[in-house]
């Protein structure tokens, strides 16, 4: 049992710029790390809501690398480094402990605002409060929403959420108890299923395909050099390269904070981008430099970065050409219509291709689950055994199916929806693992594919339309729910010294804390200050109203999927398969197909220029200066990331102290 520990230590040393101090007793995940991680998870669940709903400041829980977790984790490292220097090594956390704490906060960040709670609370409070004779929700929506799932507005419980409690009235928790219980079981079941699926596929990506998970590289390096009590600062905060990157970013953004106090003060153009027109009927190019995107994407390969930018150009030219021919393709900045179906086909194509590549490993993992003593594959370093992963995957999936069926969804739709959900989540997770691009979403959703397989919205029963939007909280999540996070948690598990089962339990417990804590806090906040004061109020009002209205519209005037849509989907699918074949058959083929799978998507469009800059900088360093200099440049980007996290924290403090509810969005959603 000693060999895995040595493998883990060598892995940390390889990814860190300083040697790992092997004199530190690294026993893997510990009890104190789990307790500390759960406490920070609760802090994160509250922080995300306060920052968006009260301060109206930066986004804490939107991207695949949530800023709320980065802030809390980095501040903890800085505090422990100082305490260890001043009061002794009992405040020193081992690399495995810092990885555990990060992973728990990482997945807990799926709770607040744009994770689960913002959508979930909106789903519960919206349908009765906003029902009017004009929108006809009472006629076409309410009959299909069971009361155990969506409470009525009895005694004004939902009205008080939006308007605030009358003076002296208690929060009507009794109206929420049963719906929240069933919703929590549902979101946790889907989360557990995705986490188990990520455990099953992890070895294929990490060992067989040698995917480096670029977004995790700076995290592992910081955890490996978090400080051993030798100095007041963590050991990764050393060197000219680090402090150069740190100084540039911290100066630029802190200088801009001065402009918050003095309108007209000259500032750096970091707050807003601009659309550059490229011709009539062609989508424009968004020009904006995202510091955090560069800091993480820089660790990805050149061919992946080039692919994301190149296929954005493909969208510009093809989308504009189709638009000039009268074929709906752009909206005007992003894909829509026929081009959307083409990208959906490409996304499904690459996801299926990746599944086919993984078929040998999946077969071996299943055999290991059936006959653990007769399989050559070793699952001792996985977060849970393959047998446990398959069992819990089956149980949680069965519960999800039963829950959706009891909610009123048609069983045929469920049987299509669950596999497409896993396929889409799998694809998003793989793209994130390949690219390190923290702002990506799927080009399509499981619900869209399931409905298209049935022939369109006209073939879907009314009850299914009514409950589809509420269920989307878990099964149509744009961030691939816990699947994408789970794959990166598994990657972090590769660097643990031991106690992987504790790690898995801590991660799932942190998810529960994040979801439950943020949801209850959001409800309390609504009754305390009034939901209408949650500005900007897209989550609690507009998302719910829009989602339910689409369901009613599909009931009243459902549209079949047109034949042309299927042809464009097939064209995207075939083109993706051809690109994959070219890449695997021809060693000189220069274009990675991953960019085609998210071509034209809104988050891709908003970050394509930044990705181009990341590619250009890395290309110059590798081709003109050399790989050795590129390796030496890595601390520069870790320094830039550290500065960005700390200056975002400074911005939150300045907003809270000086601006109250008129905050500033320093860290954006793109």
Image (tube, rainbow, N blue to C red):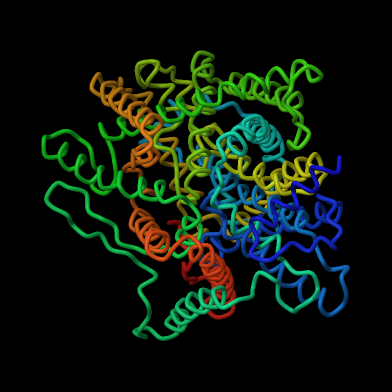
> Left or right: where does residue 320 sit relative to residue 606?
left
Please state, as top left, top right, bottom left or bottom right, where the N terminus lies in the image.
top right
The location of residue 663, given as percent across then percent down, is 49, 71
Toward the top, the furthest residue is 412
> Left or right: where does residue 37 sit relative to residue 540?
right
Q: Nearer the viewer, residue 199 or 22?
A: 22
**Does residue 62 lie above or below 358 as drawn?**
below
Q: Nearer the viewer, residue 229 or 52?
A: 229
The location of residue 221, given as percent across then percent down, is 64, 60
Q: At 72% across and 44% down in the image, what residue appears? A: 507
The location of residue 329, given as percent across then percent down, is 22, 37
Q: Nearer the viewer, residue 441 or 167?
A: 441
User: Residue 393 appears in which quarter of the rendering?
Assistant: top right
> Left or right: where does residue 461 sit relative to residue 319?
right
Q: At 22% across and 53% down in the image, what residue appears? A: 284
**Does residue 45 lie above or below 478 as drawn?**
below
Residue 606 seen in the figure: yes
Please state, as top left, top right, bottom left or bottom right, where the C terminus lies in the image.
bottom left
Residue 56 seen in the figure: no
Total numbered labels = 0
Q: Nearer the viewer, residue 471 or 211?
A: 211
Q: At 25% across and 59% down in the image, what residue appears? A: 275
The location of residue 257, given as percent across then percent down, is 47, 79
């Amino acid at each position: 049992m000693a060999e895995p520990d040595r493998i883990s230590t060598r892995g940390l040393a390889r990814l860190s710029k300083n040697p790992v101090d092997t004199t530190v007793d690294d026993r893997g995940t510990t009890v104190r790390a789990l307790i500390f991680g759960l406490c920070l998870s609760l802090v994160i669940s509250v922080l995300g809501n306060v920052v968006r709903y009260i301060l109206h400041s930066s986004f804490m829980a939107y991207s695949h690398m949530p800023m709320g977790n980065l802030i809390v984790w980095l501040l903890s490292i800085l505090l422990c480094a100082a305490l260890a220097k001043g009061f002794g090594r009992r405040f020193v956390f081992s690399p495995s402990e810092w990885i555990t704490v990060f992973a728990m906060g990482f997945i807990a960040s799926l709770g607040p605002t744009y994770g689960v709670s913002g959508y979930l609370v909106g789903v519960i409070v919206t349908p009765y409060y906003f029902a009017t004779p004009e929108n006809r929700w009472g006629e076409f929506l309410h009959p299909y929403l069971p009361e155990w799932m969506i409470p009525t507005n009895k005694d004004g419980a939902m009205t008080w959420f939006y308007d605030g409690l009358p003076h002296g009235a208690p929060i009507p928790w009794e109206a929420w108890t049963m719906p929240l219980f069933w919703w929590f079981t549902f979101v946790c079941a889907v989360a557990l299923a995705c986490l188990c699926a990520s455990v099953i596929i992890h070895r294929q990506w990490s060992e067989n395909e040698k995917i480096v998970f670029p977004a995790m590289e700076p995290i592992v390096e910081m955890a490996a050099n978090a400080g051993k009590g030798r100095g007041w600062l963590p050991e990764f905060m050393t060197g000219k390269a680090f402090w150069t990157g740190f100084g540039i970013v911290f100066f630029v953004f802190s200088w801009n904070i001065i402009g918050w106090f003095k309108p007209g003060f000259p500032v750096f153009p970091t707050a807003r981008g601009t659309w550059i027109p490229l011709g009539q009927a062609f989508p424009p190019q968004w020009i904006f430099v995202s510091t955090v995107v560069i800091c993480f994407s820089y660790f990805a390969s050149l061919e992946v970065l080039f692919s994301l930018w190149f296929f954005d150009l493909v969208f510009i030219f093809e989308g504009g050409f189709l638009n000039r021919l009268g074929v709906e393709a752009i909206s005007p900045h992003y894909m829509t219509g026929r081009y959307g179906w083409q990208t959906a086909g490409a996304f499904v194509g690459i996801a299926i291709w990746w599944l086919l590549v993984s078929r040998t490993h999946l077969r071996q993992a299943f055999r290991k689950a059936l006959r653990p003593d007769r399989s050559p594959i070793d699952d001792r370093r996985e977060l849970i055994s393959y047998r446990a992963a398959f069992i819990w995957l089956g149980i949680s999936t069965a519960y999800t199916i039963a829950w959706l069926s009891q909610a009123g969804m048609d069983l045929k739709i469920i049987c299509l929806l669950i596999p497409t959900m896993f396929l889409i989540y799998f694809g998003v997770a793989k793209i994130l693992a390949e690219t390190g691009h923290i702002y990506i979403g799927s080009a399509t959703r499981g619900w869209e594919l399931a409905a298209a397989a049935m022939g369109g919205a006209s073939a879907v029963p009314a009850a299914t339309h009514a409950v589809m939007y509420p269920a989307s909280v878990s099964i149509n999540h744009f961030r691939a729910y816990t699947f994408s996070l789970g794959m990166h948690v598994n990657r972090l598990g590769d660097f643990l010294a031991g106690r992987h089962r504790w790690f898995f339990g801590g991660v799932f417990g942190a998810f529960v804390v994040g979801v439950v804590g943020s949801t209850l806090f959001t409800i309390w906040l609504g009754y305390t200050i009034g939901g209408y004061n949650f500005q900007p109020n897209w989550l609690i009002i507009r998302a719910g109203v829009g989602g339910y209205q689409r369901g009613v519209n599909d009931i009243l005037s459902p549209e079949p999927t047109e034949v042309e849509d299927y042809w464009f989907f097939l064209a995207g699918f075939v083109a993706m398969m051809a690109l994959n074949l070219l890449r695997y058959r021809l060693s000189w083929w220069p274009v990675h197909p991953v960019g085609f799978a998210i071509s034209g998507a809104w988050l891709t469009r908003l970050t394509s220029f930044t990705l181009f800059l990341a590619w250009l900088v890395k290309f110059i360093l590798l081709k003109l200066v050399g790989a050795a200099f590129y390796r030496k440049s890595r601390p520069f980007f870790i320094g830039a990331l550290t500065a960005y996290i700390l200056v975002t924290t400074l911005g939150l403090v300045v907003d809270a102290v000086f601006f109250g509810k008129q905050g500033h969005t320093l860290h954006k959603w793109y």
